Amino acid sequence: MSVTVPVPENSVQQDNDDAEPLLHSTIRNRDLLTTTSNEDSSPSDKTGSHKDKNSMSSSRCFGVELTPDNIAVAMVYFVQGVLGLSDLAVGFYLKDDLHLDPAETAVISGFSSLPWLIKPLYGFISDSFPLFGYRRRSYLVLSGLLGALSWFLMATFVDSKYGAAFCILIGSLSVAFSDVVVDSMVVERARGESQSMSGSLQSLCWGSSACGGIVSSYFSGSLVGAYGVRYVFGVTSLLPLITSAVSLLVKEEPVHGPARRLSLGSSFFESSKSSIIQLWGAVKQPNVFLPTLFIFLFQATPQSGSAAFYFIINKLGFTPEFLGRLKLVTSVASLIGVALYNGFLKKVPLRKIFFVTTIIGSAFGMTQVLLVTGLNRKFGISDEWFSLGDSLILSVLGQAFFMPVLVLAARICPLGMEATFFATLMSIANGGSTLGGLLGAGLTHILGVTKDKFDNLALLIIICNLSSLLPIPLLGLLPRDEPDSEENTAIEMTPY
């Protein structure tokens, strides 16, 4: 199985099917936004975006000062991690209540990731149409309420695969929109900073998400076993409200008057056309287009997470409680992966990180064949212990080599359109991950892997792992970075 970590989303994606190698995660994944031009930024934003490097702060995490804005960003990512509470419940609901096959489950997972493919649209909406005078706070509140509604419907009224797909889609939209609203704050701070500082900012975000995953992981399995999936959906419906609450921490000057609003007439379309032309002018530059192409292909390799989820439940008999513990291990491993990158890898050239982690990840991914064929038991290792160890290693590797994708995306954003451009890059990456999930669903169907038949699951895992090596010859598309120094190492962009 590929160790690709989709961008949920968050996945959640959202979001993160193969970051948790033996678990099916509906969608987790994540990016962010606020302003598309420097002139749109409020005075408080500009003040916070470039701190004096000699200033001292009493409160720091991953090397990042914990200002109210940064705390808000971290909390939104924390919520994305906590929303993993519903992952197992969704998997069991689709499998046991709706009686879907692995391929159908993978298709629903891919469908629910669609909101992550149009993230620039959310940025444009947020920038162009302030709600109640705010471009950030108001949309964080709205996103939280929308997410709460989607999970409330799952807990009460949904009883078909179409209804489930729609509600999961709405929940994914909620996370994706809030992701866009906060990610611009990260991009603004990363602009002009070294690869090391950009890595610290991403470490804060994804470390917060991993902590949220740890909080929810153990209870996700025990709650499903004790109270059922509907109860878990009900509890999950309360969590997005945290996103609404932390909007109060965002320092934002209110927008007054109609000058900041676009009419639905010619000015709206003229501005849209201008933004698209500006965006295309940046994307078509070789030093942007080629790394973007690599990110897409890197994420687009087939995934086998859905089939593996059915195997460990229907064939190996893993209980919801044990799956919760397994998810706890993968969440802790993700945090270890963030710490590993932040402590040892953030100054390593990107090409070297991608090459080494891809090779190692593909090799360790093959160990899942041992579990499928039962060879682990011949070595005296139980299925449970083997799964724990395997998930730990693969999750550490998966998170460690997903971090450079975010750093690369943040650093190639042109000056003046960071938010929209970063959202575009993340949409492209999420599109690659969605394509990988659909390719995995197609392979699952072609190889005849169903909820009760796993004869070709080992072959599916081998194909997915070998395919993860395909982007290696394309490493030359990445910018040739030098190890960090104290000087600014941001990638220079030509005017567009």
Image (spheres, rainbow, N blue to C red):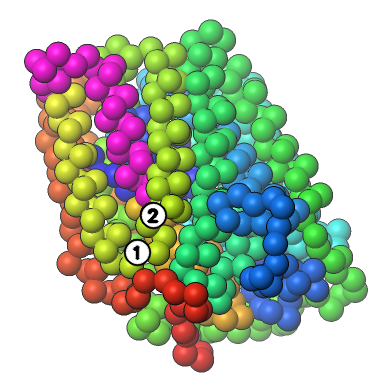
Residue 416 drawn at (x, y percent): 61, 80
Q: Residue at x 57, y 35 (%)?
A: 212
Residue at the bottom extreme?
495
**Label 1 vs label 2: CA separation?**
8 Å
As shown in the figure, which amino acid type bears the numbered disc 2? Answer: Phe
Rate crowding at label 2 as few (under 14), some (14 to 19) or many (20 or more) other CA atoms within 10 Å: few
What kind of element bears circle 2?
Answer: helix
Q: Residue at x 66, y 83 (%)?
A: 270
Q: Is the magenta stretch mostly helix, strand or loop?
A: helix
Residue 172 drawn at (x, y percent): 55, 44
Rate crowding at label 1 as few (under 14), some (14 to 19) or many (20 or more) other CA atoms within 10 Å: some
Q: Which residue is drawn at 46% across and 68% down?
A: 195
Where is 32 relative to 367, above or below? below
Residue placed under numbered mark 1 in the picture:
348
Q: Which of 225 and 103 is in front in this view?
A: 225
- Circle 1/circle 2 CB separation < 8 Å: yes
Q: Is residue 417 left or right of residue 18?
A: right
Residue placed under numbered mark 2 in the picture:
344
Magenta-highlighted residues = 373-400
Q: Which residue is drawn at 36% across and 30% down?
A: 23
